[in-house]
Amino acid sequence: MQLIAHYEVTDFAAWQTAFTADDEARRDAGLGVLQIWRDADSTTHAFALLSVNDRPRAEAWITRSNALHSDDANTVTHASHFFIETA
């Protein structure tokens, strides 16, 4: 299973720095970063593809990340997360 996350951010570079700094919390939640993208036409959209080893822990990480703006250095204005499986 994977997780696709879409973040509306104030600035992509600042968000990416904060996202990278949160790596230990993601690993503790059973998540691994597979790919990060930015919108080709905007610095306010970021996307991440993550591997999911434990969905309940991943869901707890999402809830925690949405609640704690310090995790993203106050760069995220909105986030959407989608658990996906290969069809």
Image: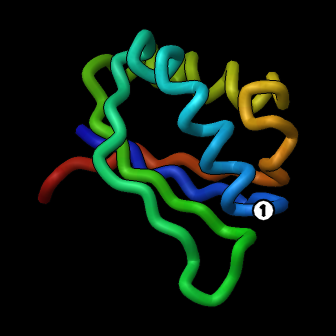
Q: Quadrant of the N terminus?
A: top left
Q: Is residue 72 above or below residue 60?
A: below
Q: How many marks?
A: 1
Nearest to the observer: residue 12 or residue 76 = 12
Q: Residues within 10 Å of mark 1 (few under 14, many from 20)?
A: some
- Give the image location of residue 65, x and y in percent: 69, 27
Left or right: 36 as drawn, with respect to 20? left
- Give the image location of residue 2, x and y in percent: 29, 42
Q: Is residue 8 above or below residue 79?
A: below
Nearest to the observer: residue 77 or residue 80 = 77
- Give the image location of residue 29, x and y in percent: 43, 15
- Pointer 1: what residue? 11
Q: Give the quarter of the image for residue 71.
A: top right
Label 1: element kind:
loop
Q: Give the quarter of the image for residue 66.
A: top right
Residue lying furthest left in this view?
Answer: 87
Left or right: 17 as drawn, with respect to 29? right
- Give the image location of residue 14, x and y in percent: 74, 51
Residue lying furthest bottom in this view?
Answer: 41
Left or right: 38 as drawn, with respect to 18? left
Left or right: 18 as drawn, with respect to 20? right
The type of colouring in the image is rainbow
The residue under the point 52% across, 24% down is: 59
Q: Quadrant of the C terminus?
A: bottom left
The residue under the point 82% across, 26% down is: 70
The residue under the point 54% across, 70% down is: 38
Nearest to the observer: residue 16 or residue 63 = 16
The residue under the point 57% across, 77% down is: 39
Amino acid type indicated by mark 1? Asp
